[in-house]
Amino acid sequence: MGDKAGMIVLSDNLKGAALMSGSMAAFVVNDTLMKLASAHFPLFQALTLRGLFATTLIGLIAWHRGQLLVPIARADRRIIGLRTVGELGATVCFLTALFNMPLANVTAILQAAPLAVTLGAAFFLGQKVGWRRYSAISAGFVGVLIIVRPGAEGFNAFAGLALVAVLFIVLRDLSTRQLSPSIPSIQVALITAVSVTCLGALLAPTQDWAPITMPGLVYLASAACFLIFGYLFSVMTMRTGEIAFVSPFRYTVLLWAMLLGYIVFGEVLDTSALIGSAVIVVTGIYSFHRERKRRIQDREPPPVPVPPRGAPR
């Protein structure tokens, strides 16, 4: 019976790993399609058009589930507002960097986000973080600096926007953790999609509106579909297998980004970017490992004192 149970856990872990890898692949395909669309549309027009597709699809899913208009408690409205600000800032900063940087480079910088969220949780939510994980976070940020290379001759200022996107992601994720469980995830995704679409439409007049082309429209519609697949797979991932086993597979996003960046755009990471990416991945996996050990220790009952020999039992 024990062997059978072990096989079930292993199967769930492998399913979770596959879903996480699929989620990361979907996000990178979305990013690739958005970068291709940048040749047809300026940023805010692309955001508006993709947002219309995404909002329609997410709205249909929410309606099908009966979660389109679930009442939101007053305490959660402010949190959703903060989360939306984080999502909007991250979207604009990330896509601006993506439109002007190699796909794999900007993706690698964003891999500092899990470490930054851990740091933010320690400072703002009072979560316990030991010196080992603080060391891992510091090493991860060193990896980011190796990729960004501030002060180097080839430094791209858009890398700074990618770093700002990481800060907005911290705000988004920490706010998400404070939401009540009663709020459906699909409703949060719908609010996000509507907000991003409205922001794009509001700022679109600040740029020249490009003619609608069929290839560009196909890129944006496809990007919206892959974006939704990424969201759905990521939710399914957190409900399948052990988080400590599944979470490190999020770094497969770097493999997908390097592969698609090379195939679609002919981009090749230089040695510094490869070294920096490796540092971020290793420190991130170590951070997940420490989190797993901490949770195991929290679940373990305190040791029962053994009475000395000869004492009454």
Image (spheres, rainbow, N blue to C red):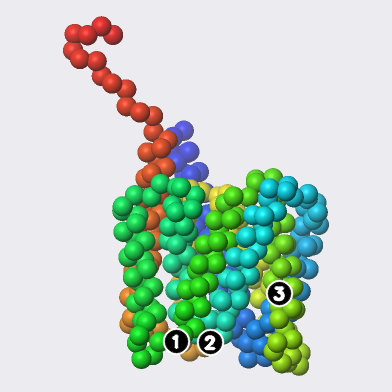
SS at mark 2 in the image: helix
Task: Please name which of the two marks, 1 or 2, marks the residue nearer to the observer.
Answer: 1
Instruction: Decide which of 147, 126 is in the foreground and name it.
Output: 126
The residue tagged 3 is 199
Question: Percent from the top left, x then y, of residue 160?
Answer: 47, 79
Distance from disc 1 to disc 2, alpha carbons, whole Å, reads 9 Å
Q: Which residue is mark 2?
A: 100
The spot of residue 100 in percent (x, y) is 53, 87
Identify the residue under disc 1.
Answer: 156
- Residue at the (32%, 65%) spot, across then down: 139
Mark 3 Cα shell of 10 Å, populated few (<14), some (14-19), many (≥20) = some
Q: Where is 248 relative to 297, above or below?
A: below
Q: Quadrant of residue 194?
A: bottom right
Cα separation, mark 3 vs mark 1, equals 26 Å
| Residue at horizontal 63 percent and vertical 87 percent from the top | 38
Tell me the quadrant of the picture where the C terminus can be found. Answer: top left
